[in-house]
Amino acid sequence: MAHSIIRTICVDIRKAGAFATIVDGTTDITVQEQESIVVRYVDVDLVPHEVFLGFFAQNSGTTGEALSAMLLDVLLRLNLPLSALRGQTYDGASSMSGKFNGTQALIAKQQPLAFFVHCLMHAGNLVAQEAMESSRVVQDAAALTNEVAATCNRSTKLTAILRGIQSQKHGRASLRPLCPTRVLVRGAALKTILDQHESVTDALSDYADVSTGEPASKTRGLLKQMNDGEFVLGLKMALPAIDLLENLNRATQSRSYTISNAVAAMKVTYEGLSDMRTERAFHDLFTSCIERCEELDLEAPKLPRVHRRPRRFEDGNAQQHVFATAEEYYRVQYMKFIDTAMAALKRRYDQPGIQIYLGLEDVILRSCNPSQPACAISVSDGNRSTRRKTNSPHTNSPQREH
């Protein structure tokens, strides 16, 4: 029955005349590499479809040559012509997206019209991951959130204590670990532990009192870190930017999303991050952190102890820089976090394949409406402009943006 369904799906794909492949790999419980293959195509009614063709065992390694041979073999067995392949989407691993020996490059040698685009949702996830790792404060807050959630999930006693406290104060909300491959859980996980900070710390305290040995020691260590104002500040620094990036990732998951929609969404996200990168924005954030610390009866973030540089690193008479206030010190961490997010977002969306598809999309739209002026979108600056057709120099109609 499964083979019959696959054959029916492949008939529809062949009728479409063109298709693109989406390939990603994972390992099963036996550490066997499995490649999932999805095909995207548009039917005669211009309705986009994404169909899962199955998991295919990969026994010959994960090099670009081995993976491209596997993909070509699957297309051959399913009678999907390589001549109809018009797109490739993979993750950013060198074996898949490598410029010379990656799967996309080897496929493109046989079918030059199969343009490669790094999966935009995966790219957005990497932007968030790269930004969080750039700031010590944000990285420590995220790591502690993950550790607390994992500890709760491993202990039925701690989970029961937490649920009891939650039922008395507010509705139940489970703590989620920050899984690197689950791209839409970071914001929810950080927000939950920030909103329910008091309940979580009370649960950890009660659990430490009734436990012994290593579990009690570890719980007290987590409790001490959670009661540091820097942890609250790290959560507040991360949440606004992570929410923006997750909204972008959520939007790019839509099957009906076009490439120009994705670039426009990236521009909105970039501008949102740019608006956050001001001293006023951080001052308001730092003030709200202090207010939250007062609500939780925690000490506000303070300047870390100044470490004197080793004498062997002394060069000249310049004095070591010392931050005057805690707000000044943490503002540097905040700006570094936002700057990294903005730079990574622009870099990961500035792909040759995206530029090609933008041009193709514009050609298709103008062929459907010849009176529509050409539309040029630049990923590098996010700007969109229109230009008049040269064969109608006497037209006086105003240009429109699309």
Image: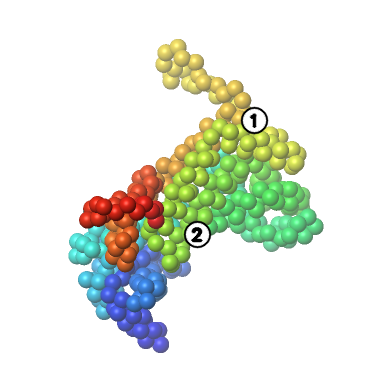
Q: Amino acid at mark 2?
A: Arg
The numbered dot on residue 302 is 1
Q: Quadrant of the N terminus?
A: bottom left
Whether 107 is drawn above or below 345: the answer is below
In the figure, is residue 160 to the left or right of 108?
A: right
Q: Tags 2 and 1 in contact by the CB under 8 Å rule?
A: no
Query: Residue at (31%, 76%) from the top-left corner?
Result: 16
Residue 345 in the image, given as x and y percentages of width and height: 42, 47
The numbered mark, 2 or 1, whose residue comes first in the sequence reads 2
Whether 20 is drawn above or below 286: the answer is below
> Observer-nearest residue: 114 or 262?
262
The numbered dot on residue 87 is none
Whether 287 is drawn above or below 106: the answer is above
> Circle 2 — which element?
helix
> Observer-nearest residue: 274 or 167?
274
Query: Residue at (35%, 45%) from the top-left corner?
Result: 380
In the figure, is residue 143 to the left or right of 400?
A: right
Pointer 2 local density, CA inside 10 Å: few below 14, some 14–19, many at least 20: some
Residue 306 in the image, given as x and y percentages of width and height: 57, 24
Mark 2 = which residue?
250
* Residue 186 in view: yes
* Residue 140 in view: no
